[in-house]
Amino acid sequence: MTAPSRHDIDDLAARIKAGERVALARGISLIESGDPEGLALSEAIFADGGRAHLIGVTGPPGAGKSTLTDALVRAYRARDLTVAVLAVDPVSPRTGGATLGDRTRMMAASADPKVFIRSSAARGQHGGLGLTTMQTARLMDVAGYDRVIIETVGTGQDGVTIATVAATILLVQTGQNGDDVQALKAGILEVADLYVVNKADLPGTDAMVADLREAAAAANQPDGWARPVIATTATDGSGIETLLDAIEAHRAYLASSPEGEQRAAGRLWAEVQALVHNEVRVAVDRYMTAPATMHAAVPALIAGRSNPIQMACSLLAARGWTPTRPQ
Ligand SMILES: Nc1nc2c(ncn2[C@@H]2O[C@H](COP(=O)(O)OP(=O)(O)OP(=O)(O)O)[C@@H](O)[C@H]2O)c(=O)[nH]1
Ligand SMILES: [Mg+2]
């Protein structure tokens, strides 16, 4: 396949903006490929973004995130809103069955032309979610979906980085996994805007709801938003309307408070950081794997005229970087 030209990129951007699903799928693949054309596409559509509401769904494996997402999709469709879903698979190896199951389950919803579903691997990115997720979500936004739901596993760092992508974050727990609230990282408790206790049809729900209420009260609360704790049974839809109302209430809150703007700015800045990190990483890799660099350095190391620390410092200094190690 030949690399797309500037004209191709503009044409693809126009088709994505016009809501062509095939074009959106192609655009996402281009972004996932990590090729510079993906960045050109992101740039071409940037000005048209910012209309969709981005919702992050995070929580431990098997908590029911996919089932809940599926239920939210149906509930949004019932309110005549269009929805795109981005299921980000974790980097860690998992049974292929779970992902496949997600896809199969979501096939029903994806027969609806106003629903778009995509699974994506978070491979090769620092901090779990990254640039690809941010830029894919923006493509979905530009394609005209009213709500974009990003599902990601994680209670730790991955869960926290969802904040660099989504505006409203749901933390999904259950009363069964013995995952008591104390064990949850403070970061994820503070980053989440709504706490969901799923599998409310099973025992342990009330205790988990009570624990999360306590945690919600103890966590740093932004002015004007008290984190709700909502019990759901994703498999039969109970609690889903309440949850959807809460998501929409949070959306309204963000739209009317300075926090909404601050957080949007934070997400943009996170994207800039990720872009700069990527570029620097590529440049460093290119420099360090260049034969000339190695040929100059290795003999001195072998002969004992230098050591790895000294060598790293002098290579950095040669490129204008000040090493953190005191000289
Ligand atoms: N009893 C009960 N089971 C549920 C509920 N929600 C989901 N499940 C079941 O829990 C299992 C896991 O659900 P998923 O939606 O795949 O969970 P997930 O959090 O997306 O899982 P991963 O993506 O693998 O981390 C499935 O067998 C679901 O049918 C619920 O409310 N009650
Ligand atoms: Mg899932």
Image (cartoon, rainbow, N blue to C red):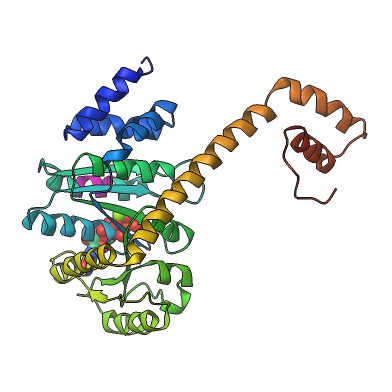
Location of residue 327 with respect to 305 vertically, above or below: below
Give the left or right position of residue 228, taking residue 218 as reference.
left
Residue drawn at the location 76% of the way across and 45% of the way down: 323
Residue drawn at the location 22% of the way across and 65% of the way down: 252
Q: Which SS type dominates the magenta stretch?
A: helix
Work out whether residue 204 or residue 145 is closer to the camera in this orientation and state it. 145
Q: Can residue 125 be seen at all in this image of the molecule?
A: no
In the rendered image, the residue lying farthest to the top is 2
Location of residue 120 with respect to 196 vertically, above or below: above
Residue drawn at the location 33% of the way across and 70% of the way down: 173
Identify the image quadrant of residue 117.
top left
Residue drawn at the location 7% of the way across and 53% of the way down: 80
Give the left or right position of residue 267, taking residue 195 as reference.
right
Q: Can residue 13 be seen at all in this image of the molecule?
A: yes
- The image shows residue 34 at horizontal and vertical percentages of 44, 32
* Magenta-span inclusion, residue 101: yes
- The image shows residue 291 at horizontal and vertical percentages of 72, 21
Location of residue 139 with respect to 69 vertically, above or below: above
The number of numbered discs placed on residues in the rendered structure image is: 0
- The image shows residue 320 at horizontal and vertical percentages of 73, 36
Work out whether residue 46 or residue 285 is closer to the camera in this orientation and state it. 46
Ligand 2, image quadrant it occupies? bottom left
- The image shows residue 259 at horizontal and vertical percentages of 36, 65
Identify the image quadrant of residue 118.
top left
The quarter in which the N terminus is drawn is: top left
* Magenta-span inclusion, residue 257: no
Magenta extent: 100-105
